Image (spheres, rainbow, N blue to C red):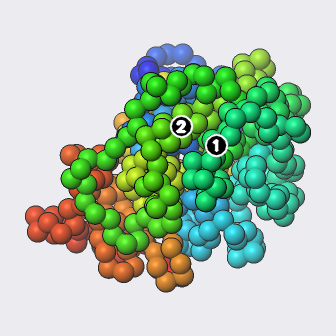
Amino acid sequence: MKVHHTGGARFVWGIVLTMAVAGIPASVHAEDGTASAARVRPLNILLIVADDLREHGGAFAEDAVSTPNIDRLAAHGVRFSRAYAQYPVCNPSRTSLLVGQRCEQTAVVDNREFFRDRLPDAITFPELLRRNGWTTRSFGKVMHAGNTVEALRPAWLDEGRSWDHAEILPAMSPHRRGEFRNLTGGVLPWCEVGILDGDDGEQPDARTATAAVAAIEDLRKDSRPWLIAVGFHRPHDPFHAPRRYFDRYPSEAITPYRDPVHASPLPPLAITGSRKEFAAFSDDDRRALLQAYCAGVSFMDAQVGRLLDALDRNSLWPTTLVVFLGDHGYHLGERDWWNKATLFERSCRAPLIIASPDGRHGARCEALVEFVDLFPTITECGGVRLPGGLAGKSICPLLADPSLPHKDAAFSMVVRNPSRFGQTVRTDRWRLIAWSDGALELYDHQTDPEETLNLAGDPAAAEVVKRLRRRLDDLPPWPP
């Protein structure tokens, strides 16, 4: 996911959006003297969510995987290098970003609870746009209504509230053909590598892309603006992808990641679950899983390319805001963990790219941003008045000038059981993790980007710990 830095026009957001909502023709001149296209209609919005897609670093070096279409999207917009999910698990993260509240506020902290059961009156940003005239359609896993190996929960699609139309498309039968290997001997059914025979079109993500492209074609000349949300399952487990994507990553060229020998021991709540199974991995197992993850990323990237082709074909870039993100991060061997659900950088941080017609192109933003910021960002870009009670802050100004300051901290949480939980604050330099059993972790990102040396007990860091604990104390209370 390489990004090239180029210049771009600075956009006066407030004036144009206000005029657009009022129906007043608007034209704004950029700093280079060119005029942006007059816009009297709010932007279309294409939202793309990739499941379990992590940012680069550690085991997943920037040159480790080929993503030409994500790179292509980044060339149209701003890549946010330090974007953080509020919870490193699918349903809580998606609920938080869709309703614009922290998980301490939503109290949705697992994959078993539909947010409407707890928050029946909550307004999602798709619902708000729909109320304000947008046609809204959802394809694939946007809400956590089901994975490729789960039964579909139709109510969780939120059709009729958030979406005019919503669907998750299953694989076509027969799609399970190829070579399969469970890396835990079947103990963890999801931990399976699948090198699939057959073409892309049999797989759910390809079918999702086909449906989304058809929706773009259908709505391209509609007088109303539209929001099309596309949720891709890959690179989420089970680690299946068509064979040709595996062929891009020869196993002999893959070097498994290893933590340094001096890594600090972990507090009891830092990682819970399948550590025994992962500790038994051989280097061949590690190479196989990393190869499969990269293959899934490249397969997903190919589907992103089909969406971008539809924007090209229909000349929609000047009228469409594109938002691409992973719903949270993922470990690929860091701390000998091959999953999510930790409060480390690799689990909480995820890709975010936003391409605005009038923002910078091909730029990188190093500001700390949170996924809870997406609700106010997308609605502001659409010119819709924000409701009260949102926890995030719009990053629209950063699309025009990525060097602007935004936030001095980002926050995430994870719950192990009703009485055991952890919260973390990430600043420009530090990450502090505080666990409900009293354990603390402090990592210095200036010297330790992989968070392997816990400084929480170092007297020299006492003031840092004290200051960051106060930031955690300012969060909404948990349990609520």
Q: Residue furthest left?
A: 460
Q: At 36% across and 36% down in the image, what residue appears?
A: 403
Q: At 54% across and 41% down in the image, what residue appears?
A: 289
Q: Which mark is residue 100?
A: none
Q: In x, y percent, where is residue 207? A: 82, 35
Circle 2 packing at 10 Å, graded few (<14), some (14-19), many (20+), is many
Q: CA distance from mark 1 to mark 2?
A: 9 Å
Position of 303 compared to 109: left or right? right
Position of 80 compared to 450: left or right? right
- Give the amino acid type for the residue marked by disc 2 in the picture: Ala
- Give the amino acid type for the residue marked by disc 1 in the picture: Arg
Circles 1 and 2: CB atoms closer than 8 Å: yes
Picture quarter with the C terminus: bottom right
Q: At 62% across and 35% down in the image, what residue appears?
A: 296
Position of 432 compared to 397: left or right? left
Evaluate whether residue 82 shows in this view.
yes
Q: Is residue 35 above or below residue 101?
A: above
Q: Name the N-terminal-most of marks 1 and 2.
A: 1
Q: Nearer the viewer, residue 25 or 447?
A: 447
Q: In x, y percent, where is residue 366? A: 37, 39
Q: At 43% across and 40% down in the image, what residue appears?
A: 283
Residue at disc 2, secondary structure: helix
Q: In x, y percent, where is residue 16? A: 61, 36
